[in-house]
């Protein structure tokens, strides 16, 4: 069934993999019957330093995030904000994967349906044209001021969807129906005391200044980081 009520979401993250990267900004735009009803946006402390590339791309700096909440502190209110509405975004599974991982780690259920403007653009745009959000907005004459900040991109995805549904919804209503979003993830276990001790010993021995907050690391994350340090610098040699 054709849907015109949803929550347009967009994230800024430290990288592309929900398994290893972190959210640094969330924006959610609640739309009811095609009109914006409410907006919500916040910066998130990822517990690590940002790369130069991400800072340049987003305009977000480490100083801007230092005193912001961790994702576990705010994911509940965002899940509540979304209510039972489908999520809308450009390649919505990307945003959903980060949000669901955060929700599961917080002990929350976050099974959602989604509307993907990227999928729609692949249907309605010329094959040879790029289907990125910027290219799609240019093609359909949607303003994209402030691109690469979450709220601007969430609004742009909403406006793009409105153009598409108004232009093609009557004749092809099925493609504007929400689809179940599938991303399987298990709750991450917190790093153990011994894992933290081993990492501390390694960094002290090799005189390494970590760019992550150790207390924020999961058991798998601290294991990967420890293995990376050993691979690059070697084990502790006892004298």
Image (cartoon, rainbow, N blue to C red):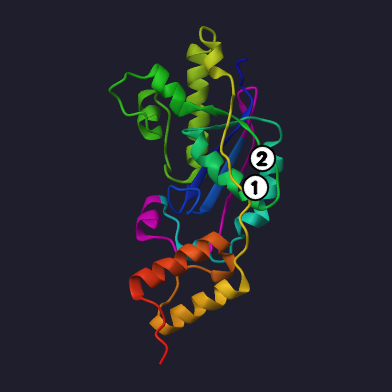
Residue 106 visible in the shown view = yes
Q: Do the residues labelled 2 and 1 touch (CB within 8 Å)?
A: yes
Q: Position of residue 55 (x, y in %)?
A: 40, 57
Residue 37 is one of the magenta-drawn residues = yes
Nearest to the observer: residue 19 or residue 3:
19
Rendered residue at 58%/19% (across/down): 177
Q: In this view, does 230 lie above or below 60?
A: below
Q: In this view, does 211 lie above or below 208?
A: above
In what element is the residue under mark 2?
Answer: loop
Magenta segment: 30-57
Nearest to the observer: residue 144 or residue 164:
164
Rendered residue at 43%/28% (across/down): 142
Residue beneath disc 2: 110
Q: Is residue 1 above or below residue 78?
A: above
Residue beneath disc 1: 103
Rendered residue at 28%/22% (across/down): 128
Quarter of image, res 69: bottom right
């Amino acid at each position: 069934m054709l849907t015109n009520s949803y929550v347009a979401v967009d994230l800024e993250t430290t990288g592309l993999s929900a398994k290893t990267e972190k959210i640094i900004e969330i924006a959610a735009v609640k739309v009811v019957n095609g009109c914006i009803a409410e907006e919500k946006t916040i910066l998130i402390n990822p517990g690590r330093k940002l790369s130069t590339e991400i800072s340049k791309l987003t305009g977000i700096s480490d100083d801007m995030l230092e005193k912001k909440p961790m994702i576990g502190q705010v994911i509940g209110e965002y899940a509540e904000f979304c209510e039972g509405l489908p999520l809308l975004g450009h390649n919505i599974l990307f945003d959903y994967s980060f949000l669901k991982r955060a929700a599961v780690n917080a002990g929350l259920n976050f099974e959602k349906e989604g509307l993907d403007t990227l999928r729609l653009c692949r249907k309605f745009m010329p094959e040879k044209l790029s289907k990125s959000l910027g290219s799609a907005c240019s093609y359909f004459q949607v303003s994209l001021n402030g691109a690469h900040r979450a709220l601007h991109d969430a609004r742009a995805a909403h406006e793009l969807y409105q153009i598409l549904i108004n232009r093609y919804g009557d004749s092809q209503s099925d493609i504007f129906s929400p689809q179940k979003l599938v991303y399987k993830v298990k709750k991450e276990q917190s790093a153990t005391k011994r894992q933290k001790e081993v990492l501390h010993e390694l960094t002290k021995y090799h005189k390494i200044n970590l760019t992550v907050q150790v207390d924020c690391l999961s058991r798998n994350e601290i294991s990967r980081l420890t293995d990376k340090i050993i691979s690059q610098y070697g084990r502790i040699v006892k004298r």
